[in-house]
Amino acid sequence: MATMAAVDLGAQSGRVALGNFDGDRLSVVEVHRFPNISVRTHGTLHWDVLRLYEEVLEGLTAVAGMANALDSVGVDSWGVDFGLLDRDGRLIQNPVHHRERFLLRSQRARSTSAPAFS
Protein backbone atom coordinates (compact mmCIF):
# COMPACT_ATOMS: atom_id res chain seq x y z
CA MET A 1 0.00 0.00 0.00
CA ALA A 2 1.27 3.47 -0.91
CA THR A 3 0.68 6.26 1.61
CA MET A 4 0.99 9.90 0.65
CA ALA A 5 0.29 13.39 1.88
CA ALA A 6 -1.24 16.01 -0.40
CA VAL A 7 -1.06 19.76 0.18
CA ASP A 8 -3.45 21.99 -1.78
CA LEU A 9 -2.99 25.76 -1.52
CA GLY A 10 -5.92 27.51 -3.15
CA ALA A 11 -6.77 31.19 -3.43
CA GLN A 12 -9.40 30.97 -0.66
CA SER A 13 -8.21 28.07 1.50
CA GLY A 14 -5.61 25.38 1.92
CA ARG A 15 -5.80 21.79 3.02
CA VAL A 16 -3.66 18.81 3.80
CA ALA A 17 -4.92 15.31 3.08
CA LEU A 18 -3.78 11.75 3.70
CA GLY A 19 -4.10 9.34 0.80
CA ASN A 20 -3.76 5.57 0.59
CA PHE A 21 -3.55 3.55 -2.62
CA ASP A 22 -3.90 -0.23 -2.34
CA GLY A 23 -3.27 -0.94 -6.02
CA ASP A 24 -6.96 -0.72 -6.94
CA ARG A 25 -8.48 2.12 -4.96
CA LEU A 26 -7.37 5.50 -3.75
CA SER A 27 -8.83 6.72 -0.47
CA VAL A 28 -8.36 10.31 0.63
CA VAL A 29 -9.09 11.88 4.02
CA GLU A 30 -8.87 15.62 4.59
CA VAL A 31 -6.80 16.08 7.74
CA HIS A 32 -6.38 19.84 8.04
CA ARG A 33 -8.15 22.80 6.38
CA PHE A 34 -7.30 26.46 6.85
CA PRO A 35 -8.20 29.83 5.34
CA ASN A 36 -5.79 31.47 2.93
CA ILE A 37 -5.99 35.11 3.98
CA SER A 38 -3.89 37.64 2.12
CA VAL A 39 -2.28 40.58 3.93
CA ARG A 40 -1.89 44.19 2.88
CA THR A 41 1.56 45.62 3.57
CA HIS A 42 2.49 49.18 2.61
CA GLY A 43 -0.55 49.33 0.32
CA THR A 44 0.19 46.11 -1.56
CA LEU A 45 -1.72 42.82 -1.27
CA HIS A 46 0.55 39.83 -0.48
CA TRP A 47 0.22 36.14 0.20
CA ASP A 48 0.88 35.41 3.89
CA VAL A 49 3.59 32.83 3.17
CA LEU A 50 4.73 32.46 6.78
CA ARG A 51 1.24 31.63 8.01
CA LEU A 52 0.68 29.26 5.08
CA TYR A 53 3.94 27.52 5.96
CA GLU A 54 2.84 27.09 9.59
CA GLU A 55 -0.55 25.72 8.51
CA VAL A 56 1.06 23.24 6.11
CA LEU A 57 3.42 22.06 8.87
CA GLU A 58 0.46 21.63 11.21
CA GLY A 59 -1.32 19.53 8.61
CA LEU A 60 1.75 17.41 7.86
CA THR A 61 2.25 16.84 11.58
CA ALA A 62 -1.35 15.60 11.80
CA VAL A 63 -0.76 13.31 8.81
CA ALA A 64 2.40 11.94 10.44
CA GLY A 65 0.33 11.03 13.51
CA MET A 66 -2.07 9.02 11.35
CA ALA A 67 0.40 7.19 9.08
CA ASN A 68 3.25 4.82 9.92
CA ALA A 69 5.33 6.17 7.04
CA LEU A 70 4.84 8.32 3.95
CA ASP A 71 5.90 7.30 0.46
CA SER A 72 5.48 10.77 -0.99
CA VAL A 73 4.32 14.33 -0.39
CA GLY A 74 2.77 16.40 -3.18
CA VAL A 75 2.09 20.14 -3.17
CA ASP A 76 -0.30 21.99 -5.48
CA SER A 77 -0.69 25.76 -5.44
CA TRP A 78 -1.76 28.74 -7.49
CA GLY A 79 0.20 29.13 -10.69
CA VAL A 80 0.23 32.85 -11.40
CA ASP A 81 2.20 34.25 -8.46
CA PHE A 82 5.80 33.75 -7.50
CA GLY A 83 8.32 34.55 -4.78
CA LEU A 84 11.81 35.87 -5.43
CA LEU A 85 14.67 34.14 -3.62
CA ASP A 86 18.12 35.45 -2.78
CA ARG A 87 21.37 33.56 -3.51
CA ASP A 88 20.92 31.47 -0.38
CA GLY A 89 17.40 30.40 -1.32
CA ARG A 90 15.66 32.70 1.18
CA LEU A 91 12.43 34.41 0.26
CA ILE A 92 13.07 38.12 -0.31
CA GLN A 93 9.47 39.18 0.38
CA ASN A 94 6.02 37.65 0.47
CA PRO A 95 4.70 37.13 -3.08
CA VAL A 96 2.37 39.86 -4.36
CA HIS A 97 -1.19 38.58 -4.66
CA HIS A 98 -2.49 38.20 -8.23
CA ARG A 99 -5.59 40.17 -7.28
CA GLU A 100 -3.52 43.24 -6.51
CA ARG A 101 -5.00 46.21 -8.40
CA PHE A 102 -1.59 47.40 -9.57
CA LEU A 103 -0.94 44.09 -11.28
CA LEU A 104 -4.39 44.09 -12.84
CA ARG A 105 -3.82 47.57 -14.29
CA SER A 106 -0.41 46.47 -15.55
CA GLN A 107 -1.87 43.40 -17.23
CA ARG A 108 -4.62 45.46 -18.88
CA ALA A 109 -2.06 47.99 -20.16
CA ARG A 110 0.07 45.24 -21.69
CA SER A 111 -2.89 43.56 -23.36
CA THR A 112 -4.07 46.80 -24.98
CA SER A 113 -0.61 47.84 -26.21
CA ALA A 114 0.48 44.49 -27.64
CA PRO A 115 -0.07 43.98 -31.37
CA ALA A 116 -2.63 41.34 -32.36
CA PHE A 117 -1.38 38.19 -34.07
CA SER A 118 -3.43 36.39 -36.68
Image (cartoon, rainbow, N blue to C red):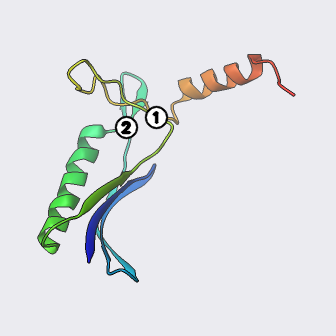
Q: Residue furthest front?
A: 23
Image side of residue 12 versus residue 48, left or right: right
In terms of depth relative to the viewer, which is nearer, 42 or 18? 18
- Residue 65 occupies quadrant: bottom left
Image side of residue 83 versus residue 32, left or right: right
Position above or below: 53 against 118? below
- At a point 54% along the width and 23% down the height, the residue shown is 102
The disc label shown at residue 47, or none: 2
- At a point 24% along the width and 53% down the height, the residue shown is 55
The disc label shown at residue 81, or none: 1
- Residue 89 occupies quadrant: top left
Comes first in the chain, label 2 or label 1:
2
Residue 5 percent coordinates (x, y): 28, 63
Q: Residue furthest right?
A: 118
> Given the image, on which type of amino acid does mark 2 rest?
Trp
Q: Give the class, few, some or many, for how many residues have Cα within 10 Å of label 1's Cα (few <14, many ≥20).
A: few
User: Is residue 5 visible to the viewer in this orientation of the structure?
Assistant: yes
Q: Would you say the residues marked 2 and 1 are in contact, meaning their CB atoms lie under 8 Å apart?
A: yes
Looking at the rendered structure, the number of numbered marks drawn on it comes to 2
